[in-house]
Amino acid sequence: MLPDTPILSVKNLRVAFGRHEAVRGLSFDIHAGETLALVGESGSGKSATALSILRLIEREGGRITGGSIRLGGTAPAEITALPPAAL
């Protein structure tokens, strides 16, 4: 992994519950040593964002990568088996 490659990258994340769009177009990168805080009112999509990154709920769109691994196309068992160096 290149030094300036984010350890987590979220691009244009969309999460919906039925017709209610909880997260619309969220993008961010987290690099080694950085911390990200999601802040907002109740119902603003903080938990939906975290749960979709963890793949505990389905996302409607967007791309999530951990290092050089695209998480949306990887089986959960494979993600837990990744060595720390892969991230």
Image: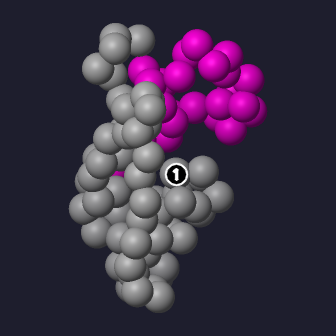
Task: Between residue 34 and residue 63, name the one nearer to us.
Answer: 34
Height in image: 76 above or below 13? above
Height in image: 39 above or below 8? below
Height in image: 33 above or below 60? above
Whether residue 63 is visible, yes or no, is no
Which secondary structure, mark 1? helix
- For residue 79, which quarter of the picture? top right
Which residue is rendered at x = 73% and y = 23% of the image? Answer: 81
Residue 62: image x %, image y %? 33, 51
* In this picture, residue 87 sits left or right of residue 31: right
Which residue is rendered at x = 64% and y = 58% of the image? Answer: 56
Q: Residues within 10 Å of mark 1 (few under 14, many from 20)?
A: many
Task: Between residue 23 and residue 28, name the one nearer to us.
Answer: 28
Identified by mark 1, the residue type is: Ile
Quadrant of the rendering where the N terminus is positioned: top left
Check residue 84 for magenta coloring.
yes
Instruction: Report the label total.
Output: 1
Which residue is rendered at x = 60% and y = 51% of the image? Answer: 54
Q: Which residues are magenta?
A: 62-87
Residue 78: image x %, image y %? 69, 27
Whether residue 10 is visible, yes or no, is yes
Check residue 25 for magenta coloring.
no
- For residue 63, which quarter of the picture? top left
* In this picture, residue 29 sits left or right of residue 85: left
Residue 4: image x %, image y %? 29, 20
Which residue is rendered at x = 57% and y = 32% of the image? Answer: 74
Q: Which residue is mark 1?
A: 53
* Coloration mode: one colour
